[in-house]
Structures are given as C-alpha cells and as structure tokens.
Amino acid sequence: MPFFDPLESTFYGHCVERLLTSKDLAPLLADGIVELGPGTARPVVEALRRSGSRVPITGYELDADSARIASRATARAKLGNYTVIQGDFFAATDKPGARQHGDPADRRKAGVVNLPVGGAAVRRARCAIGNPPYLPAIARPVGASQLWGGHDGAHVARRVLAQEMDVVLLMIASISDPVGLVRHARAAGYRIADWSVRPIPFGRYSHQPWVSRRIGELARSGRAFFGPEGYLLAGVTWVRGGAPTGATGATGATGATGEPDAPDDAATVLRRILTAAGSATSLDETAGVGRTAGARRRVRIASGLHEVPHRPASRLSGSG
C-alpha cells in the first residue's frame, strides 16, 4: 500500500495547483510534466480538478500496488491528461549518457529498471514534480524504505534536480539538510520561482530509532531544524537559469538585471524560514508532542515573496 499522510497530501496538492495556475511558467509546462512517485495520485488529481489544467502529467511509480491504486484513482476522476505508469522515474528522465546515481546494488534491491520508460514524450517534458522521500537514515529504515531519502534525507531530491528539467517542483523538509539542498540547486543553475511552507508534526516513522538518531546528528551539525511541535515542509518551484519565464524579480525567477549570477532573494528568505523551524537537537525533546496534538493547531501556509511583497522577511515564519 502507498504511504499516505493527509497533511502532506493536501499541501503537496496545493503546491501543484499553484504551479498549474502560474501564467509565467505556463509555456514551460505545455510540453508535459513528469511526476516522481504518485503514491495514491490524490494530490495531483485534486490539483487538476481545482485548476482545470489540461497539461499532460505522467507519474512514475515503482511500487506495483501503488501504481494500480493510483491508476484506478485517475480512471475514477476521468482525467485524460494524468497517466500513471509502473516504472522508474529516473530511467525515464535520465539524459543519454548521464551518470547513474547511487549504489547499483541499492538500485537493484529497489527494483529500479535501467532502461528508459516513456520514450520521446518524456524526453520532451520540461517540468518535473514530486514529494520525494526525505527521512534521513544511515541505513534503509525497516518498514519505511519508500520514505528513505538517504543519509541526509535530500538524496532523491538532488537526483531529481540532476535531470536538467527547466522547472522542478519538490517538497523539501527542514529536517533533511534544507540549506545544503537549496545551495545545491543554486549551484546546478536553478533559481527559486515560488515557494510555500507549512508545519508538519512528527509521525511514527520519524521516531524510529535509526531515523530519529540521524535527525539528531544532522541537527547537531546544523543540517536539520525542528522544534517541539515538529518540522517545516516546503513546496519549492525552481526554474533553471536559462529558461525563459516572462517574469523578473517579482517571482524570484530572475534578478532585476536578468543575469544568472544575480542574488536569489527568494532562496535567502526560504533558508531563513526553514532554519527557524526550531533548535532542538534530539527528538527526545519532542517526545511529549504527538501527531494528533499537532494536527489540532490552526496552521497557516506561508508562500512566496510575490504573494506578500510588503511584509518583512522576519514575519514570513510559516509556522502558524
């Protein structure tokens, strides 16, 4: 069965809807979108319904049961522009001759197929989306392997950014080296076009010893940020430096001069928000706060700079 969390699912769908309704990015979406791990497919189904978008989306799901569930969901929704395929996102999107990432043995264990899936239609797609696994752990967590994001939780997200898409929408967590990931994207030629942030309470998988121990290690080295009520999850849309968007500094897609080395002010604000998620160094400090208690709080989603142009950065906490 696919992992499903109603908080993350709803938030991911909100971020996808923002992307689908962006007038500036519409030209880059016209050739199609590829999705990493649709899971239940509910978030994108709802985003397509609300937005009315006709952009073709192809989701790649490795897990056979999840792929069947997602395919049934798209069929019930009668969405002709959303297709779910059982296959490997990276095999479908890797450019010819691109370096394979990760340990080959791990890829075989995960059932990764090395042959491309989807053909020329996928090659033409210029946008990738997904809520990649982000739980950090030294070893693949038992019972939660589909949620494992590597040693720092950001491994899968970096692989998506390496596919050289013009537009990438990913969910990133404050417990999974968010500063390093934002810097990595910048070094790869991406600038932030849009973002939204919301709080997420810790769940049972985060409290598994091999995960909580690693989160604590990352926190003590300044690579994970969380507090008594949980962590922050951000939906971030990046645009590659050379991709035209028709926008200027208002969206963060280009600087005021349009130069690729112009300061990325949106990235600066986003880093400030994510690192303000909390200064705890161990999940033991959050043991008294559970998912149910956190879910009762009234939460607010903070969004990109162009949504709140007159507010100082210090007020964009996104923590409710």
Image (cartoon, rainbow, N blue to C red):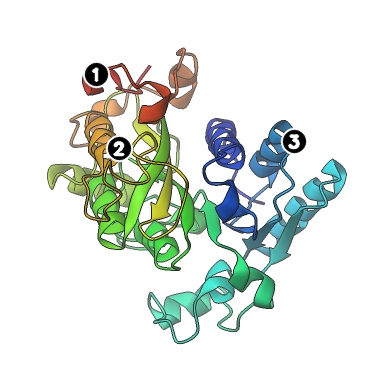
The residue tagged 3 is: 49
Query: Who is closer to the viewer here, 56 or 220?
Result: 56
Q: Where is residue 21 shown, x and y percent of the image?
A: 61, 37
Identify the secondary structure beneath mark 1: loop
Q: Is residue 137 something that shows in the picture?
A: no
- What distance separates the C-alpha of mark 3 from that of mark 1? 34 Å
Query: Who is closer to the viewer here, 116 or 264?
Result: 264
Q: Tell which tag, 3 or 2, sits nearer the viewer.
A: 2
Q: Determine the image quadrant of residue 118.
A: bottom right
Identify the secondary structure beneath mark 2: helix
Identify the secondary structure beneath mark 3: helix
Q: Residues within 10 Å of mark 3 (few under 14, many from 20)?
A: few
* Sequence-earlier tag: 3 or 2: 3
Q: Are marks 3 and 2 in contact (CB under 8 Å)?
A: no
Residue 228 sits above or below residue 254 on the image: above
State the quadrant of the C terminus: top left
Q: Are marks 3 and 1 in contact (CB under 8 Å)?
A: no
Q: Which residue is situated farthest in the bottom direction here?
A: 97
Q: Are marks 2 and 1 in contact (CB under 8 Å)?
A: no
Q: Is residue 96 something that shows in the picture?
A: yes
Q: Is residue 102 left or right of residue 183?
A: right
Q: Which mark is residue 266?
A: 2
Give the amino acid type for the residue marked by disc 2 in the picture: Ala
Q: Is residue 252 left or right of residue 57?
A: left
Give the amino acid type for the residue marked by disc 1 in the picture: Pro
Q: Which mark is residue 25?
A: none
The residue tagged 1 is: 312
